[in-house]
Amino acid sequence: IKSAPYIVIGTLLAGFSLWYKNTGHPECVRLLDINAAYISLLLVCYVLPVGFLVVSFQLFGTGMKTMRTGYSQPLDSAVFRDTIAKKGLLSTTRGIVLLVLPVFAGLVVYLGNDAYTQATGGKSMHEIARKLEAKCR
């Protein structure tokens, strides 16, 4: 039940990508009155990096527990199958990676925003859609 939002979002993204792949000319198709090629640009530049940032923030607590206790997986964490909690250099490294992950994810969000700015050249959504759809007429 806790993973239901992730399953729904993943299913929607997978469905969109399959539909987009099977579309002959995605720049000529509109979905929810927005150009499909522009939607894919938004997904790549904003939705995926922000999703990565959200997941990294959720893992930050696990990294804190790992660094505090020294065990990986933390002893009070719920796991799908029985695991042996390990202590040592590898668990410390895992904790550090989980703590640094939000910084890296923030960099990915910044790079996604920069990629969007470079791809659009500072034009509005309507100008980009008109330019894409001009090839269809």
Image (tube, rainbow, N blue to C red):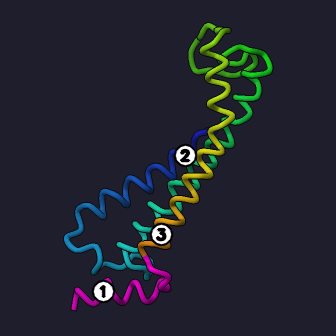
Query: Quarter of the image containing the N terminus?
Result: top right
Q: Earlier in the sequence, mark 3 or mark 2?
A: 2
Q: Earlier in the sequence, mark 1 or mark 3?
A: 3
- x and y percentages locating residue 41 in the rendered image: 42, 68
Between the C-alphas of marks 1 and 2, the distance is 33 Å
Q: Badge 2: few (under 14), some or many (20 or more) residues near its Cα, within 10 Å?
A: few
Q: Residue at x 54, y 54 (%)?
A: 49
- x and y percentages locating residue 135 in the rendered image: 23, 86
| Above-or-below relation of 3 to 42 | above
The residue indicated by pointer 1 is 133
Q: Badge 1: few (under 14), some or many (20 or more) residues near its Cα, within 10 Å?
A: some
Find out whether the residues at labels 3 and 2 contact each other: C-beta distance under 8 Å: no
Q: Amino acid at mark 2?
A: Tyr
Q: Quadrant of residue 109?
A: bottom right
The residue indicated by pointer 2 is 6
Q: Residue at x 62, y 23 (%)?
A: 94
**Which sits in the foreground, 36 or 97?**
97
Q: Residue furthest right?
A: 68
Q: Nearer the viewer, mark 1 or mark 2?
A: 1
The residue indicated by pointer 3 is 116
Between the C-alphas of marks 1 and 3, the distance is 19 Å
| Above-or-below relation of 59 to 110 | above
Query: Quarter of the image containing the C terminus?
Result: bottom left
Magenta stretch: helix, strand or loop mostly = helix
Q: Which residues are magenta?
A: 120-137
Q: Residue at x 47, y 85 (%)?
A: 123
**Which sits in the foreground, 104 or 79?**
104
